[in-house]
Amino acid sequence: MKKRLYLILASITVMIGSGYYLSGKIIQADYYKIVARYNQNKNTKVSLLSYKRGIFHSQAKLELQIPSINSNKPQILPLQQTISHGPLVAVNTPNGFSLKFIASQIETCLDGEWQAQLVKYTGNSKPLTMNTIVDFSDQATTWITGAAINKTTTDNMHITWSALQGEISHDVNFANYTGNISLPKISIKADNWDLSIDELLLKLEKSTQTANYLNNKTLRSKSISFNRLQNPIIQIDDIAARLEFIKNPAQNIDIGLNINVVDSKILQQKFAQDNIKLQINNLDTNNFPGLPAINALNIRTSLEFMQQLTNAKDTRLTIELTKHFTEALISYLSYEIYKSSMLGKLDKRSDEVIMRDIASSINKLIVSSLNSKLFIDQGMYYALNFDRKSS
């Protein structure tokens, strides 16, 4: 009787082990195919450095190359992944562990120096993780978790960052997805200024199943405030920025950026229901140039970039800026840039006089732009209609 029981238990063990072993082989083959499909994207590249398959788990190391906002060279992010083989996995969800019948679970985190720096900065052994479960229909759910930060830097700057949470439903190729990423609070305090951002929410949506639709992203914040020496300088309430990409019937791309601010205050000026709009219609992606790096942006490179964008036939660029809000914001940002420059540090005039001179210069610049018909006065806002025929 005991021998028969041992044989039954041994058979069950062999069957379970064989199931996980075969599952691991299938997952590895699919994993290679997914990496190859990701590398068809022109903007990113994935390099698989190693893949070690086990019976119940596999380990992978990768390098992800993404465009850099500060340089024309791509940014390289080292990643490590732990892949748990199905069919029965103890899934790590935001509500705790639960046993699920799925194809696999993938835990992703940064690797190397990036991970070491985040661990040191947050004091958390898992500062940023993405946990993905994949079902047998190649549909997946990814939970993103970022550790909170409460840190004082060597230059006496105090940074507080709430725990980041996100959930995205997608297919394994990320061709279609919906999700939210939330960050309740960001606070940065220096000796003479402080910045606070409340209830930051990023909504993601992409679908390739509808013929004319690509994707959109919406970034919202309940409040953004900037104070200097405890005096309120900029206060923006209920801001929403929506960026969308739509494929039109001509198979070109329409890009729209719409920023809406319900209430705001810049120094002593109050504003309500302001809207900023950028629209690029009929953009041929084959002629789409690279966006200049942020450290290379200036008026000339920005205008050259607009000209390149609209160089294709029938491509049209439209920019609409609310009058008084835009003037006040540009004036204050110009003041900050001037004060941080060498010339600004040597300027002994009062802040009020400097601010007044800068506001006057900005006003003259806008008047000059209107006279040269670069901008068009449309009542409550300035509009730039930049098409190839009139340029």
Image: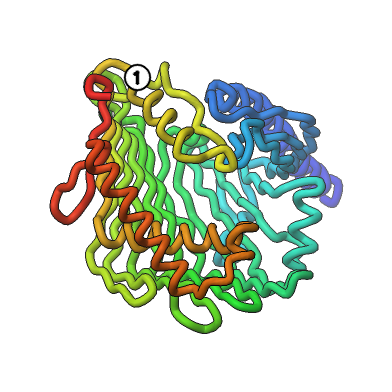
Total numbered labels: 1
**Pointer 1: residues within 10 angstroms few (<14), some, or many (20+)?**
some
Report x, y in % for residue 31.
64, 29
The residue identified by callout 1 is 311
Q: Which residue is drawn at 24% across and 56% down?
A: 323
The answer to whether residue 148 of the structure is visible from this angle is yes
Q: Nearer the viewer, residue 28 or 213?
A: 213
Image coloring type: rainbow
**Where 197 falls versus 37 (above or below)?**
below
Report x, y in % for residue 334.
47, 57
Report x, y in % for residue 35.
62, 27
Q: Residue at x 32, y 35 (%)?
A: 255
Classify residue 271 as left or right of residue 37.
left
**Where 389 falls versus 357 (above or below)?**
above
Report x, y in % for residue 199.
44, 69
To which quarter of the image does residue 271 belong? Answer: bottom left
Q: Nearer the viewer, residue 349 or 127?
A: 349
**Where 100 falls versus 183 (above or below)?**
above
Q: Residue at x 58, y 62 (%)?
A: 344
To which quarter of the image does residue 148 belong? Answer: bottom right
Residue type at mark 1: give it: Asn
Classify residue 300 as left or right of residue 46.
left
In the image as oriented, which residue stretches furthest toward the front? 348
Q: Which residue is drawn at 57% across and 55% down?
A: 144
